[in-house]
Image: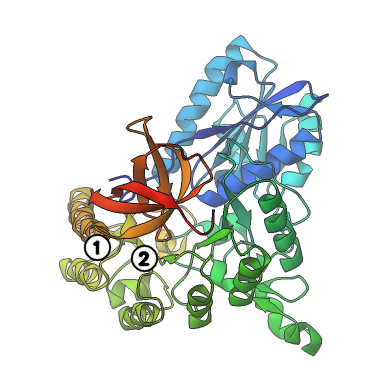
């Protein structure tokens, strides 16, 4: 069940159309969260202006960049294995330069140049505009590094290229960084403090995507609910803003409404939310506009109040239940998904049972579950002993995965006999005779192709389901087509 557990996204080489006049070749590969994939589009845009066209052939690349994830050790080990592959190619093509981008670059900094002799440049998430200068240093025979975290960089002035795009769905970054110091998480250290992008630049990007034929966007941030524009600056400094800035500020609910009204036929999603920051204004805005999808990714991490406190999560089990109840009262058909960590330090069997009972209460549509992985530099690594044996972590993880399988099937069964609107995104993985797309709840729907095409909004009657997929037949175009 592909939605249930996803330790790290597979590396994806990203390709855009050739830009006339460019002679150098860039191979860029991304791992981890959607923000990394979005950042790679920004990087490709910056380097296109420096004479680089992207390629999907590693062997012909002049510059190889890997955009990395540090959220779990497995993600970092995957990147190191890819660097071994790059090294083999570099022995054949010694002029090829290799760079590491993203969170792993920010975490390890200059150590990366020492540990991985193949690496020529190391660039943190806030330093991509400096890439042309860093590449010039490398070409002059020097190693290059820039991992300085910014207090204001949002890349709002850069129009991202759409890499390996289906021409239908796109990511739109609205915030960067995170102020929530969860004890297990490296994101505040690798991506810095929260700052938001000018809403006007976001609307301009949304309008531009619609003009180019895109039908769905995902508003993206480490914590979208913390979006707050008051003229620039860190969110933590909002209290120091002028009265005029406060009066004209834009929060996430208002931004969501602005996007919905700007393009009424464009589907809008968002990710990721944080329970402590999500307000019911956001849910009411979702209910108000048909083009905002009824789906919220709402990570909880644990069902135990004791463990939540140890994680420095700013919500309790009871507060989370109240939020779920309120969401379902305002938006009854809203799908909800989770992130869950099992085996956090000191977790007891009772804590684990609390997580299981929370899942039973919510019955998530799907989720992303992981065994705890100690990350260097985090408060948990510094203060807490990683004292849960691996076999217990794996056993508890399997119980959680099995329970999510059960709940996912419960949720997909609810669609049997109903007709749902589906945006066609691609051919089905299992049959080139079928289309694949998602409904408003983000559940994958598969149905015969007939005369429909990618980008069509189609009404599909659901006849069957698996734990992760709805199977049906098209009954005509939807009103949004």
Cα distance between the residues tagged 1 and 2: 12 Å
The residue nearer to you, when weighing 329 against 94, is: 329
Q: Who's the residue at 42% across and 73% down the image?
A: 312
| Residue 155 x/y as whole percent | 73, 54
| Residue 97 x/y as whole percent | 68, 24
* Crowd around label 2: few <14 · some 14–19 · many ≥20 (10 Å): many
**In this view of the protein, can residue 141 be seen by the observer?**
no
The residue nearer to you, when weighing 218 against 213, is: 213
| Residue 29 x/y as whole percent | 56, 34
Please say if 64 is above or below 398.
Answer: above
Report whether 187 appears left or right of 305: right
Give residue 335's mark: 2
In which quadrant of the rendered view does residue 227 lie? bottom right
Report whether 31 appears left or right of 61: left
Please say if 244 is above or below 397.
Answer: below
| Residue denoted by label 1 | 414
Q: Residue furthest bottom?
A: 243
Please say if 396 is above or below 347.
Answer: above
**In this view of the protein, can residue 5 be seen by the observer?**
yes
Q: Secondary structure at mark 1?
A: loop
Give the position of the N terminus as an image quadrant.
Answer: top left
The residue nearer to you, when weighing 163 against 65, is: 163
Q: Nearer the viewer, mark 1 or mark 2?
A: 1
| Residue 470 x/y as whole percent | 30, 50
Q: Who's the residue at 55% across and 20% down the image?
A: 87
Report whether 75 appears left or right of 93: left
Q: Secondary structure at mark 2?
A: strand
* Crowd around label 1: few <14 · some 14–19 · many ≥20 (10 Å): few
Q: Who's the residue at 64% across and 41% down the image?
A: 162
Please say if 347 is above or below 281.
Answer: above
């Amino acid at each position: 069940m592909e939605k249930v557990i996803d330790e790290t996204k597979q590396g994806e080489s990203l390709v855009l159309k050739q830009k006339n006049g460019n002679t150098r070749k860039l191979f860029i590969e991304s791992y981890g969260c959607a923000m990394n994939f979005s950042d790679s589009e920004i990087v490709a845009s910056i380097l296109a202006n420096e004479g680089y066209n992207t390629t999907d052939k590693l062997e012909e690349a002049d510059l190889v960049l890997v955009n990395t994830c540090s959220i779990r050790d497995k993600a970092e080990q995957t990147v190191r294995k890819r660097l071994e592959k790059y090294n083999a190619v570099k022995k054949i093509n010694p002029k090829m330069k290799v760079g590491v981008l993203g969170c792993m670059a920010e975490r390890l900094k200059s150590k990366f140049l020492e540990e991985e002799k193949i690496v020529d440049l190391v660039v943190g998430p806030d330093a991509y505009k400096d890439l042309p200068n860093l590449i010039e240093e490398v070409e002059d025979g020097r190693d290059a590094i820039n991992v300085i975290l910014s207090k204001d960089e949002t890349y709002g002035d850069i129009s991202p290229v759409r890499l390996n795009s289906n021409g239908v769905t796109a990511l739109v970054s609205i915030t960067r960084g995170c102020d929530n110091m969860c004890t297990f998480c490296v994101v505040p250290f690798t991506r810095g403090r929260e700052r938001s992008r000018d809403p006007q630049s976001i609307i301009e990007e949304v309008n531009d995507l619609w003009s180019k034929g895109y039908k769905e966007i995902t508003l993206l941030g480490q914590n979208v609910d913390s979006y707050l524009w008051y003229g620039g600056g860190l969110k933590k400094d909002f209290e120091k803003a002028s009265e005029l800035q406060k009066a004209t500020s834009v929060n996430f609910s208002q931004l969501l409404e602005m996007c919905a009204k700007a393009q009424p036929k464009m589907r809008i999603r968002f990710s990721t939310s944080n329970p402590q920051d999500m307000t019911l204004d956001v849910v009411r805005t979702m209910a108000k506009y048909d083009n905002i999808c009824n789906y919220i990714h709402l990570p909880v991490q644990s069902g135990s109040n004791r463990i939540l406190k140890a994680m420095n999560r700013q919500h309790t089990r009871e507060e989370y239940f109240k939020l779920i109840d309120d969401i379902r009262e305002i938006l009854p058909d809203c799908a909800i998904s989770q992130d869950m960590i099992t085996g956090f330090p000191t977790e007891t069997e009772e804590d684990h049972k609390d997580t299981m009972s929370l899942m039973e209460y919510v019955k998530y549509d799907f989720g992303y579950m992981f065994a705890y992985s100690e990350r260097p530099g985090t408060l948990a690594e510094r203060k807490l002993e990683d004292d849960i044996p691996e076999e217990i972590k794996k056993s508890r993880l399997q119980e959680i995965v099995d329970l999510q399988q059960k709940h996912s099937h419960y949720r997909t069964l609810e669609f049997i006999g109903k007709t749902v609107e589906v945006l066609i995104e691609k051919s089905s993985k299992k049959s080139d005779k079928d289309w694949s797309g998602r409904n408003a709840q983000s559940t994958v729907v598969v149905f015969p192709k007939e005369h429909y095409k990618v980008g069509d909004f189609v009404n599909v009657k659901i006849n069957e389901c698996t734990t992760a997929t709805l199977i049906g037949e098209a009954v005509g175009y939807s009103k949004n087509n």
